[in-house]
Amino acid sequence: MTKQLLTRPALGTGLLLMIPMVMTLVDRAKAPGEGWHWSPMDFVIMGALLFAAGLAYELISRRLKTPAQRWLAGLGILVIVVLVWVELAVGALSQLFAYLFA
């Protein structure tokens, strides 16, 4: 893998993780359950998820020819990231499937 291939996903991941880091620092005096309280493991997991998504987009978009195909690939990856994030945050998909198939 080239250095350029890893640079954009790494920078994007770092910049996106600055949002919860700042909010966690701002809300550190609030009670648990109120505000942002990310643990170090939350940052590791979300960093891995965001970096993997960015790297997947970089690898996939290199093979696609039109901007429309790149947009669809990006949208598909974004949907997958959001679904994984929601599941990790509150278990929404597990609860939905349990409700639908119970």
Image (cartoon, rainbow, N blue to C red):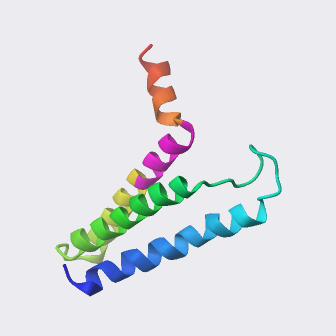
What percent of the width, then of the height, locates residue 22? 68, 69
From what the image shows, is residue 4 above or below residue 69? Answer: below
Classify the position of the C terminus by image quarter: top left
At x 77%, y 59%, the residue is: 28
Which SS does the magenta portion mostly show?
helix
The answer to whether residue 89 is magenta is yes
Q: In front here: 86 or 38?
A: 38
Q: Is residue 49 left or right of residue 61?
A: right
What percent of the width, then of the height, locates residue 26? 77, 66
From what the image shows, is residue 46 above or below residue 15? Answer: above
Q: Give the farthest residue toward the bottom.
A: 4
What percent of the width, then of the height, locates residue 79? 42, 53
Q: Quadrant of residue 4?
A: bottom left
From what the image shows, is residue 31 above or below residue 58? Answer: above
At x 38%, y 80%, the residue is: 8
The answer to whether residue 55 is magenta is no
Q: Is residue 53 left or right of residue 98?
A: left
Q: In front here: 69 or 32?
A: 32
Magenta range is 81-90
Classify the position of the N terminus by image quarter: bottom left
Q: Quadrant of residue 101?
A: top left
Q: In front here: 25 or 85?
A: 25
At x 27%, y 80%, the residue is: 5
What percent of the width, then of the height, locates residue 99? 50, 20
At x 24%, y 76%, the residue is: 66
